[in-house]
Amino acid sequence: MRKRRFILTWINRLLLLGTVVSGLGSLLPANIFAGASLLSLIFPTLIVPHFVMLLVTLRISTKRILPNIIGIGLTIIPAFAQFPFAKPMNQPQDCLRIATYNVRAFYQGLDAPEKMSAWAERENIDVLCLQEVRRPSHKPLEESFRHVAFSPKISRYSVGIFSKYPIIHTESLTFSYVKQGKRYPTRSAGLADIVLPWDTVRFINVHLNSTGVQDGDMEVAPSTEELLERGKEIARKLAGSDRTRGLQSKSILEWIEESPHPVVLCGDFNSVPGGNLYARLLFNLEDPYIFKGSGKMGSFEPLKRRYLPIRIDWTLHSEGIESYDQHIDHINLSDHYPLVTTIGPPIEEKATSEEE
């Protein structure tokens, strides 16, 4: 029995050490330590072995569960950022629905824009933030949204913000820390100040650098040599894209800091909620998915198809906004799925208006 307790103690200690190293590593800036985001992918999954070891340890010695409790505490927030466990709350009548959606340039089908417009109308979407918009294919969407802002404004390939409420200011944003030779990754962001019923809110729409990994790269290789070669190529792509996203992150943090209005940050981040950018965003913004996420998992179809239902599309907002639900709608009109969020005015402000 003593030997069993000794082995159990060291397993728990090593597991906790690996969790701490993984967590700290994921917080390193990706532009300096390329590949740090891979640790942010691993880190939340460590809640599973901690939970298993907690159950095992409870049966043998309740005095040795502290490392498991600490490990679960460290990983629970990033785990909840992927796992939708809540049910939609009762929503006041003055709530609005916003969605972020990478539309893959509408290549999923000739009638994809029409179907997206019908979906947005059916779901009562008030503000729609799109990435990888190919113009003028977007025209059917303008029938549902009177106010539109594109970034870059003159490019046929851009990000777009579609709103049923007035847009009083728009701006194309530049990821100034990224080399100017990379055209789209330097200009794939924009903002729009939208006059909502209770306040003017700044919507920032971003599309961070893609991993560059194609669907075919993840197919099983027929030989060991080809598998190793393909693995090296994938690692090279991931490290390079990770470094670019780290540079883009610096600009995002500056834009939020400089905003004169409450912020809604939407987009395709091409990484899971975790790591340096996500941790720093949580100092100023809230992620509704953590405690209000509902429905099905997975916002990227190629990974979901391979039993990796992770979320790489995010919507976060300032404290001056209340959220009631966030869910992923699995409609097959792109290689991504839209992330839908229900928001409303701050509860204090709502209570005051009701008293009046």
Image: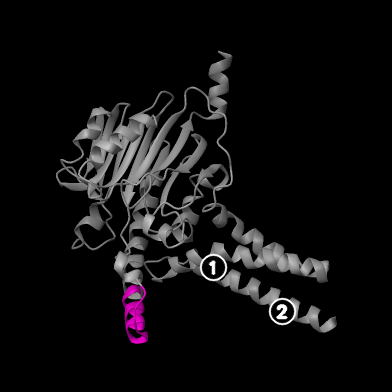
State whether residue 213 appears in this view. no
Q: In this view, does 171 lie to the left or right of 122?
A: left
Question: The C terminus lies in which quarter of the figure?
Answer: top right
In the image as oriented, which residue stretches furthest toward the top?
A: 356
Instruction: Tell which of 270 and 177 is nearer to you.
Output: 270
Amino acid type of the residue tagged 2 in the rendering: Trp
Q: Is mark 2 on a helix, strand or loop?
A: helix
Q: In this view, does 99 lie to the left or right of 177?
A: right
Report the magenta residues as a range.
Answer: 220-234
45 is higher (above) or lower (below) than 96: below
| Residue bearing the label numbered 2 | 10
| Residue bearing the label numbered 1 | 24
55 is higher (above) or lower (below) than 13: above
In the image as oriented, which residue stretches furthest toward the bottom?
A: 225
Q: Is residue 230 magenta?
A: yes
Instruction: Tell which of 286 and 229 is nearer to you.
Output: 229
Residue 45, position as x, y percentages in the image: 56, 64
Task: Please tell me which of labels 1 and 2 falls first in the chain.
Answer: 2
Residue 212, position as x, y percentages in the image: 29, 65
Q: Is residue 175 magenta?
A: no
